[in-house]
Image: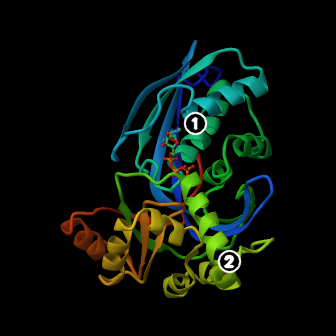
Amino acid sequence: MSLAEPFPSVRVRAPGKINVYLEVGRLMPDGYHDLATAFQAVSLYEDVTATHDDDFVIGSITGTVPLIGVPKDDRNLALAAAKLLAAETGYHGGVRLDIAKDVPVSGGMGGGSADAAAALVACDALWGTGLTSGDLHALAARLGADVPFALLGGTAVGTGRGDNLNPALAHGRFDWVLAANPVGVSTPEAYAMLDRHREEHGAEIGHGRDVPGVEADVLHALRQGDARMLAAALSNDLQAATLRLRPDLSEVLELGESSGALAGIVSGSGPTLAFLCESAEAAAELQQTLVTSGTDALLAHGPVPGARIVG
Ligand code: ATP
């Protein structure tokens, strides 16, 4: 193939994420909350392959995780991303997207957002639309609050709805065990539960800060690459709400924490639980313990890069 010929297809890989810190601000009159979060991209990847087509179609959805609930129609975030890019750039053709998923579906790890980010990068390359990374970031933010981070990857602080992103300095490698759960948690339900809890117990727990911010010790731990320090600083305001909705998760959280994890945390609104470990060996041992107890547990490490062309 000469360089002048278009690519027949483009494959892009984008990572899932863990929120190592998630603070939810006070409920705003518009029903939303401002957030402050520290994202870490981890080595569970979504691969999206874009191939020229006259229509916009999902060709196949495969993966190493249960795929229940992943739509094949316009509700699929990858397809929505492709259509948005075409509309914004005036591209007249279509695309077929084949999606291979490693990120647990509805797991609070941003798998659908990673698909959207991957589709944006893949279609931009396939169609030669040549957007700048700033343009892609702006489109990503329109698709969902977690999509810009899947483009960026690494480690970043998100504020506003989580999509106002600033890369954060990070060193070293953090080893995680992710306990997946086949029954998803609805993110709006987790927020509603948190609001109810704050309404009932505001006097003791407060209503959330007006302007939330990531605590300095989290950023320090990430900069130092210090897993013990990060374990002590892990925090998620949605955790109590998710555990109220899903008391069954507490048992797994306790098992992980008493079986070698430095600390465990609900990932986003769950139901995935993320256990931070001292080393890759410690993570492998914990994974074994969880699997033996009947929990589906995956190994991952971070930080890893954002959406990029592979193959
Ligand atoms: P969120 O916190 O945004 O709800 P999540 O990280 O918990 O997301 P995802 O796997 O991203 O979980 O999917 C959430 C929902 O989004 C799914 O139940 C599904 O209905 C819908 N969805 C749309 N596109 C996709 C996609 N490409 N992959 C997975 N789910 C998708």
- From the image, state whether disc 1 or disc 2 is nearer to you: 2
- Residue 275, position as x, y percentages in the image: 41, 73
Q: CA distance from mark 1 to mark 2?
A: 36 Å
- Residue 177, position as x, y percentages in the image: 38, 68
Using the image, tell me which numbered label, if any, was put on residue 46: none
Is 10 on the left or on the right of 155, as rendered? left
Q: Which residue is drawn at the image coordinates 57% and 67% (left, top)?
A: 238
- Residue 124, position as x, y percentages in the image: 67, 32
Q: Badge 2 local density, few (<14 within 10 Å), some, or many (20+)?
A: few
Is tag 1's residue or tag 2's residue first in the polypeptide sequence?
1
Is 210 on the left or on the right of 36, as rendered? right
Q: Secondary structure at mark 2?
A: helix
Q: Secondary structure at mark 1?
A: helix
Q: Residue pushed farthest top? A: 54
Relative to 274, say whether 107 is above or below.
above
Label 1 CB, ligand 1: below 8 Å? yes
Judge whether residue 22 can be spotted in this image. no
Q: Quadrant of the rendered structure where residue 70 is? A: top left
Q: Badge 1 local density, few (<14 within 10 Å), some, or many (20+)?
A: many
Q: Which residue is drawn at the image coordinates 57% and 25% (left, top)?
A: 7
Q: Nearer the viewer, residue 234 or 150?
A: 234
Using the image, tell me which numbered label, if any, was put on residue 202: 2
- Quarter in which the N terminus is drawn: top right
Judge whether residue 36 can be spotted in this image. yes
Q: Nearer the viewer, residue 33 or 140?
A: 33
Q: Amino acid at mark 2?
A: Gly
Using the image, tell me which numbered label, if any, was put on residue 77: 1
Count of numbered marks: 2
Q: Which residue is drawn at the image coordinates 35% and 79% (left, top)?
A: 254
Q: Nearer the viewer, residue 34 or 46?
A: 34
Q: Nearer the viewer, residue 192 or 276?
A: 192
